[in-house]
Amino acid sequence: MITSIKLFFRSLKRNKLFSFINILGLTVGFFSSILIYLYVTNEMDYDNFHENGDQVYRINQTFIWGEDSPNLFSATGPGVGYSIKQEIPEAKHVVRVFNANDMLPIKFESAGQERFFNDESVLAVDSNFLEVFTFPLLYGDKNTCFDNPNSAVLTYETAEKFFGSHDVLGATIDMDNGESYKVTGVFQKIEENFYLDEMDVLVSLNSIERIKTSDWNWLWTMFETYILLEDQANPQVVQSKLDNLLEKHAGQTLKAMGYTYEEYIAAGKEWNLYMQPLTDTYLKSDNVISIHGDTGNIKIVVALVGSAIFLLVLSCINFINLSTAQFTTRAQNVAVRKILGGNSSMFVKRFFGEALMYCMIAALFSIMLVFYSVPLINQSLGTTLSFSVSGQPQLIAFLFILIVSVSAVAGFYPFVFFNAFKPISAMKGELKTGRKGVRVRNGMLITQYVLSFLLIIGTITIYEQLNYFLKADLGFEKENILTIDNAEWTGSLNEFADEVAKLEGVVGTSVCDAVPLLVFNGDQFKTDEPDATSLPLNYTLGDENYTDLLDFEFIVGRSFEQSFSSDTASIIINETAAKTIGWAVDESILNKKVENWSGKYKVVGVVRDFNYWGLNGPIEPFAIFHSKSNPNGGRPLTRVLVKTFGNDADMKALEKRLEAKWNEFVPNRPFEYTNLSEHYASSYETEEQFGSVLSFFAVLTIIIASLGLFGIVVFTLEQKLKEIGVRKVLGASVGSIVLLFSKSYIKLLLIAFFVAVPIGYYVMNIWLSDFEYRINMGVNIFAFSLAILLSISLAISIVQTAKASLMNPAEVLKDE
C-alpha cells in the first residue's frame, strides 16, 4: 500500500503537466457535481418533513378563467372543501388556505408608538391546519390555536420582528380590516423547506364573515384546498369520487354562470378536480398556476443532473485519453512487471489505485472550492444551499460513491488497454498504439466536443429566449410605468392621483384596480342575448386616463370619457373576448351588452390583444371596467397608475417626491410601489437563473475539453518531434506543418458539431415548447457555438504545433 502511494507520487512528479491536467479536470467535475447535488437535494427536499406528508394531497382544478387552457389552477372556491367534507369519508381532514394579505398592514402599539408592518404574508387557515401540516409550536396548543375567531399564530421570525420576543401569547395585533387578533401560538423556527413558505402570520379562517356563507361557491377561486387521507384510503378511489362532485354540489355556482350541469357539459366545457401529492407541489407544478409560494421546476433539476453527468464523463475521458496517450512510455514499464510475474490483480491495484488517488486529491480540492463558493452562489442566485461535510452524512455517502464510481470508470479502460498487449513486443520496441487505440482516443475527443456543444447550444438558446421575452412588444406600455400600491389608504384616490399628476417627472395618473401583469380579477359573464352561455372574463377597473397611459390600441370605438356619465356602466374588451363571444370586431359591436350578477355593461370599445399575463401563456378574454363600476362587489380600488419620463437618475428623484406626497396623505404608513418593467423582468427570474447556471457549466465543459485537447496535442507533438524535424530539413514551412497537424483535430471538432446539432435542436425545442411565444432556433445559435469551440481548438493546436515547429531540427535529430 505504502509502496503504491510512493510510486503514485513519483509518477505525479515525473509527469507534472499530465498530472495537473488530470487533477484539474477531475476537480472541475467533482466541484460541479457537489454543487448540483446540493441544489437538487435542496429542491427535492420540500415538504418531506410532515408526519403524514405521504397522505396529504392538494386539490387542483381546471383553469376555468381561460378558454381551453392546458394549465391547472392550484386555487379552488371555498365550496370545494365543503363538498369534499360532505361526500368523501376517506378524507380525514380538509384544510383550506386563503391569502388574506388584504388585511395588511398589521398595526400595534409598542412603547407608546404605533408600529406598522406591511411586508408580511397573512394566510387564513381552517382550525385543523396543524393536524395536516407538521409545524411544531414553540408556544400555544396546536389543537386549539385556530378554534376561535380572530386568533393569530406567528412564525418564530415574525414574533421576534414584531415584539422582540417569542413568548407573546395573548398579545394583540390590529389588522387593516379594523379587527384585533389575539396571538394564540408561535411556531418553532422552521429549518426545513416547504411550499407554503410565505406564511408570516396565520389567522383563523372563521374570522372572515364572507367565508362562513360561501360553502356553495366554487367561483371564488382564492383558496388552496388540502386533504389528509385515512391511512388505508385508496387515492384512485378518492379521485373517482372527486370526479362526481361538480354535478352534485356546484349547481348554484353553475346557475350563476348561466348553466345547468347538463348544459355546461353539452357546451363542451371542462371543470375537473385533480389530486396532487403534497411533496410534488413545489417541484412538479410547472403545469399548475400556483397562488401561494414559489415553485421549482423539475426540468431544471433534470438538466442540472445531466450537466453533472456530462462534466464527470468529460473528466473521465480526459483521464483515459491522457493515460492511453502515454502508451509508449508506460508500456515497457508494464511489460517489465509482467515478465517479473505481475498478474491481473496487480494491474487492477495499479490502475484503479492510480485513478483512486487522482480522484481523492481532486475531491479534496473540490470540497475546498465548494466551501468557499456556496455563500457566493446563494447570494447571486437567491438559493439557500448549505454545505457541511461533517453535518451531512448523505453528502459523505454521495462523495464516497462519486469517488469510487469515477475511479472505476477512469481506471477501467487503461487497465484493459495495458493488460492486453504482449510484453515481449513492448520490450523490443515493436509495439504501436495502432489504429484502434487512435480511434478510441479520437472517439473520446469527439464525445467531449459533443457534450460541450450541447451545453453551449442550450445556454445560447435560453438567453435568446430570455432576450426575446424582455424585448417583446406586449401590446401595451410597460416602460416608465409605476403603480402606487395600497392607495386606498389615502382616503381619496382621485384627490391623491390629481396631486401626484402635478409632480415633476409625471406624465399622468390613473385610478385603477390593477395593471397588466398584475391582473387577478376574473368572473363569469354572458351577453344579454337569449340562451347566451357564460364566458370567463379576466378584468381590471380603470378611469378615463387608463387606456391612454398604457397606450392601448383601439380597433373599434373609444375609451371612457368624463363627458359621458353612462360610461360608469360601460366596458372595453379585447379582440379575444369579442371573438370568443362570437361578435364581429367592427362597428356593430358597439353598444352590445354583457352582464353578470353585478349588472349590465355596454361595450364602448375594443382594444387590440395584448399579453396582460406576459408571454408564458395564450391571450385570454379580457375587459376593462370603469373605475366607478361594480364588477368586483364594491371592493375599493387599490392602485394609482403613474406614467413617468426621464432616466434612472430622474426616477430616483421622482421616487422621493412620490414618497413625500404619500406621507402628506398617509403619515406613518409604508410607501410601496411597483415598477412594471422591473416586475416583468423578475417574472422570468427562473429562466435567467437557469441560463446563468447552465452557462457556468458550459464554461466548465469548455475548460475540461480544452484541457483534454491540450494534453493530447502536447503529448502527440512530443512523439512527432523527429517527424517535424525531418519535414523542416526537407523544406517544409512552419505554416504547412501547423496546418498538417491541426487539421486532424479540426476534423474531429466538425464531426462532433454535426452530431451535436440535431441532438441540441431536438432537446431545446422540447424546452421551448413550454412557452406560448418562443424563438425559432436559427443558424446563428449553432454557428456561434461552433465559433466558440473552433477558435479555442485552433488556438491550442496552432500555438502548440507552431511552438514545436520552431524548434531547431538539429536539436531534435542529433541522435539520428
Image (cartoon, grey):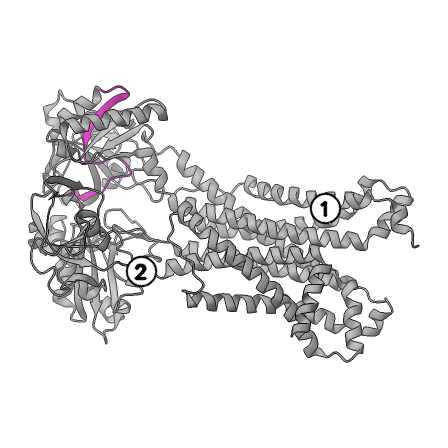
- Regarding mark 2 in the picture, which secondary structure is present there? loop
Give amino acid for label 1. Ser
Apparent side of residue 5 relative to residue 247 in the rendered image (left or right): right
Task: Name the spot of residue 695 as percent of width and height, x first.
Answer: 51, 46
Q: Could you classify mark 2 by the number of other residues whose Cα lies within 10 Å: few (under 14), some (14-19), or many (20 or more)? A: few
Asked whether 303 or 155 is in front, the reply is: 155
Q: In the rendering, at what x and y percent does residue 120 appear?
A: 21, 46
Q: Residues within 10 Å of mark 1 (few under 14, many from 20)?
A: many
First reached walking from the N terminus: tag 1 or tag 2: 2
Highlighted magenta segment, given as a residue range: 503-528
Work out whether residue 113 or residue 282 is closer to the camera in this orientation and state it.
113
Which numbered dot is residue 797? 1
Which residue is at the front of the view, 141 or 737?
A: 141
Q: Residue at x 57, y 57 (%)?
A: 27
Point out the frontmost of discs 1 and 2.
2
In the rendered image, which residue does mark 2 sit on?
192
Label 1 with label 2: CB-CB less than 8 Å: no
